[in-house]
Image: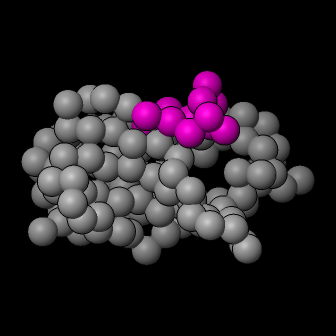
Amino acid sequence: QVHVVESGGGLVQPGGSLRLSCAASRNIFTIYVMGWFRQAPGKQRELVATLTNGGTTHYADSVKGRFTISRDPAKNTMYLQMNSLKPEDTAVYYCYADLDGSSRQWGQGTQVTVSS
């Protein structure tokens, strides 16, 4: 079993940056895949980025070149560095951890608002 807790959301102006953190309750190398989804008001939850325990990353087309997913094994923490933020990036961002590819454990979400 694994639990994850997000942090780092907030209000930022267009073009600005934020870094989200996702702290896991166990060694992240024992987690098959971790990632980020987001959900904007009135929209479906959408995949943002994923990172496997082998280091493979995947990004949604809408964030490629602007967002970077990474990890710090010493802290059992995954990060999402978000640069060049746009108003359309406004959403609640959810971290998840999937131990074996069959079941995601979700965090509580963190709000990101991009507005001038």
Tell me the residue at 28%/57% (across/down): 97
Tell me if 22 is positioned left or right of 31 in this view: right
Nearest the eye: 23 or 55: 55
At a point 33% along the width and 39% down the height, the residue shown is: 51
Quarter of the image with the N terminus in it:
bottom left
Give how far across and how far down residue 61 sits, in percent: 62, 34
Residue lying furthest top: 65
Q: Which residue is at the front of the view, 22 or 105?
A: 105
In this view, the residue in front, 41 or 82, is 41
x, y percentage for residue 85? 72, 41
The boundaries of the magenta stretch are 58-69
Q: Is residue 66 left or right of residue 59?
A: right
Q: Within the magenta stretch, is there residue 77? A: no
Q: Residue at x 45, y 52 (%)?
A: 36
Q: Which residue of the protein is positioned furthest toward the front in this rendering?
A: 102
Residue 46 position in % (x across, y down): 56, 56
Label count reads 0
Residue most extreme to the right: 116
> What sort of colour scheme is used for the picture?
one colour
Seen in the image, is 57 located left or right of residue 48?
left
Can residue 28 be spotted in the picture?
no
Image side of residue 38 versus residue 24, left or right? right
User: Where residue 58 appears, x then y in whole percent?
Assistant: 43, 34
For the question of whether residue 1 can be seen, the reply is yes
Task: Indicate whether 98 appears above or below 29.
Answer: below
Please name the residue shown 51% across and 51% down the image. 47
Residue 59 belongs to magenta span: yes
Identify whether 114 is placed above or below 66.
Answer: below
